[in-house]
Amino acid sequence: MQTKVSIKKPFIPVILLLAWLVPGSGHFLAGKKHKALFFFLMLTGTYTVGLCLGGRSFFLDRENYFTFLAFLGILLNGAIYFISLVFGLFRDNLLGIYYDAGVIYTIIPGLLNFLVVLDAYDYLSGKKV
């Protein structure tokens, strides 16, 4: 038995910002608690594995197109990116044997988080039940 969540339109951008910062929180507020837990564990877990493998932080570089895309992908992770920056959890070990996998495992969850936010928007706007 699915219930349709009705949220006033002015609150949807605030909820989407929260959904970007904490993966799965948009689904939680839409009443999809199992999906919210799955997305939170999947995205934060993948990002954490990427950090453990030696993923690094990228900064805004307009001269190198690929570095800019990597920065955008990592930035889309939300609050966990900022937490890892503040506490210095990036290794920046360019010679590590798992460096490439670590970079991929820190970028991909951000891109997936963007899709999760779009899915939460569909639930919040009533396009999905």
Image (cartoon, grey):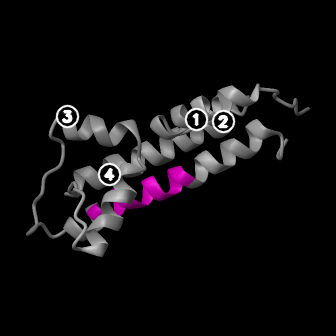
Which circle marks residue 27 in the picture?
2
Residue at horizontal 20 percent and vertical 56 percent from the top: 56
Please name the residue shown 45% across and 36% down the image: 21
**Marks 2 and 1, how far apart in space?**
9 Å
Picture coordinates of residue 116 (x, y %)? 60, 49
Q: Which circle, 3 or 4, is nearer the viewer?
A: 3
Q: At numbered mark 2, what does the secondary structure look like: helix, strand or loop?
A: helix
* Residue type (three-letter) at the residue carrying disc 1: Leu
Q: Which mark is residue 49?
A: 4
* 27, above or below 55, in the image: above
Q: Mark 3 or mark 1, which is nearer the start of the sequence?
A: 1
Say left or right for 1 vs 32: right
Q: Are marks 1 and 3 in contact (CB under 8 Å)?
A: no
| Location of residue 124 (image quadrant) | top right
Q: Is residue 30 above or below residue 125?
A: above
- Amino acid type at circle 2 is His
Q: Which mark lies nearer to you, 1 or 3?
A: 3
Look at mark 1 in the image and give the residue it sits on.
37
Of the two numbered discs 2 and 3 on the same chain, state the one appearing first in sequence.
2
Q: CA distance from mark 2 to mark 3?
A: 27 Å
Q: Which residues are magenta?
A: 103-114
